[in-house]
Amino acid sequence: MGIQFGLKVLMVSIVLVMVASSVVVDTKGTEDGGGKGIISLEVPSFVSIASARSGGGGGSNSGDATREGTQILEEEAGICFHTNVQQEINLTVAKEVYRRTEHETGDYTIGAVALPGYPETEDVHVYVHKDGWIAAYYPNYEPITKIIDWLDFLCPPPRDITSTKLEDAILKMCDGVNVTLIWTQTKYHDFRAPNADRMMIVTGAQRVGGERVGTFKIELPGDLLVGERSWSHFAANSSNSSSLSIDEHTINSFGPCRDGVVTKYGTLTQTQLNLDEIHTVRLGHGDGIWTTGEAVSAIALIYRTGASPIEIGEKCDSLWNVPTEYPKELINDTVPPVITNVTVTDITTDSATIKWDTDEIAYSVVKYGKTSGVYTKLVWSPLFITTHLMGLTELLPGTSYYFVVNSADQSGNWAGSSEFCFTTEGADAVFDTGAPVNPYHNIPGTHNGTITPNQTIEVVMLYTYSCPGTGGHSEYMKIWNETGWNAIANWHGYKEDWHNISFDTSSFTLVEGETYYYSIKTGAYPQIHHTDKLSTPCGVITCSEFMDANGKRYDNWIPAIKLFRVEA
């Protein structure tokens, strides 16, 4: 299943929560073909996201064939309401329903459908295919709350929202082309978030004669994956002002609108409706005279549920919550994703990044281990995407790791790669004597001896262990071998990191098994190993002579030092 756009949020669900006088939204679409109040979010089976990989065949009404023009839907549509009327549609007649035509071929047409009582900015885009598919949508930059039909809410009591603007647009198209809308064949889908998880709708309003302020509290659990937070605020024939706020921060406000209606909608930031916090949503009227009208507000979420439910309290006593899931049977997809371009990047001593591509949105799994064919660890991501990137951490330095990648599409079809291998960078070897248990007696002087590493060591700097609370340091070091090669480091006083001194070459290598000679002049209070020979994890250091500042000579004073490439 090919995808024309980038990252897809794994989840989709909609919550429309409105303050005061809560009532369940009455919609005609059903999850299993019966009942009210259920808006199922399902991928239209005629678009490539659902069926391009299924072969594209079938008759004029086959449910698993990709229709011409659906790429436009994938690229520009957001929330969508779609159906198959199961009979052919005359596109010439369909075009007469549009206010304006936007795309057309011999097989499909897309245009803007005007809604009674709404300005042109509220027109709904409607896709019509000659074989019976109809999809009504708003563009992907519009908030989810734009679908709310507030004018329908103003109908005589009971004041329930019984449809959305998308439903109204499809009904208008069906009437125009003289076909019957089969409500059990209608579904909602959000092209920005193709894998629906849960949807919930609650509505309510404030009217003259009721309380001036209505509030409810909402808490989104920390494991919720939220795709969009949006709001809508509506007022009609109101003689008083109204405002919508969250946690005492005003989101929107209206002045009086005695002879008309006003509507605004927009998105919320993450901090305005953050996870793991109890938020208070408030719809209030001013203190002035309020003799006519009403106001309503909505908070909308597109999300994937976690282990904990969304909590809503206070005056939102009618809450609708139903599960939705990807329609595997409808899509009829049995072909797994194709995995390509498996690469390993950003390899360090303890981490690496695995990248790969799939030809359809799928989630990501990496299985890996230190033995070929044996994968003892696993990392995964539930996001449905086409460009996959997984980080492996807490790896061992200088170690080979074997791995395979797996991806599964929304229909549960699995694909796996062949085995790949990478090796982490080896940790920089450090010649480190460590700090002695008893560093005293210590006095400035010059140390001479040998260093014989048991592995190759890259060196840039010398570090000197100082006695606690002192400024112990090395003022000078020369290291050389029998070939005449040498490197020198000098101290530049108590500034910056005075414990470390750099050599006059950018770096040099101490070769495994080769003996090097050293001469180190120390200042006051360096730490001392009182022995003539000291074994370390990276080799052996000896003392041939130490002469202190008073001219006394010793053969068992080894300086406590560290030779290394990267600053410790």
Image: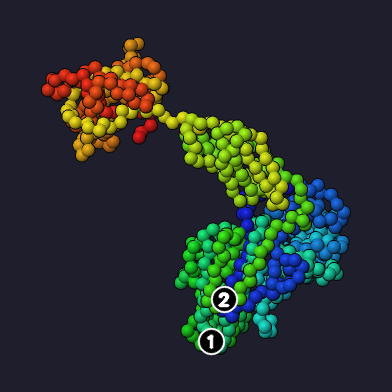
Answer left or right for 75 relative to 556. Answer: right
Q: Residue at x 80, y 53 (%)?
A: 64
* Disc number placed over residue 437 in the picture, else none: none
In this rendering, the count of numbered labels is: 2
Q: Residue at x 54, y 58 (%)?
A: 223
Q: Residues within 10 Å of mark 1 (few under 14, many from 20)?
A: some
Q: Amino acid at mark 2?
A: Cys
Quadrant including the C terminus: top left
Q: How is the image coloured?
A: rainbow
Q: Nearer the viewer, residue 381 or 17?
A: 381
Q: Residue at x 77, y 57 (%)?
A: 330
Which image quadrant is residue 524 in? top left
| Residue 406 locus on image (x, y percent) | 65, 42
- SS for dot 2: loop
Q: Nearer the viewer, residue 460 or 369?
A: 369
Instruction: Measure how far apart labels 1 and 2 are at the Cα level.
Output: 24 Å
| Residue 83 locus on image (x, y percent) | 78, 63
- SS for dot 1: loop
Q: Residues within 10 Å of mark 2 (few under 14, many from 20)?
A: many
* Disc number placed over residue 316 in the picture, else none: 2
Q: Nearer the viewer, mark 1 or mark 2?
A: 2
* Disc number placed over residue 290 in the picture, else none: 1
Q: Is residue 216 visible?
A: yes
Q: Nearer the viewer, residue 83 or 169?
A: 83
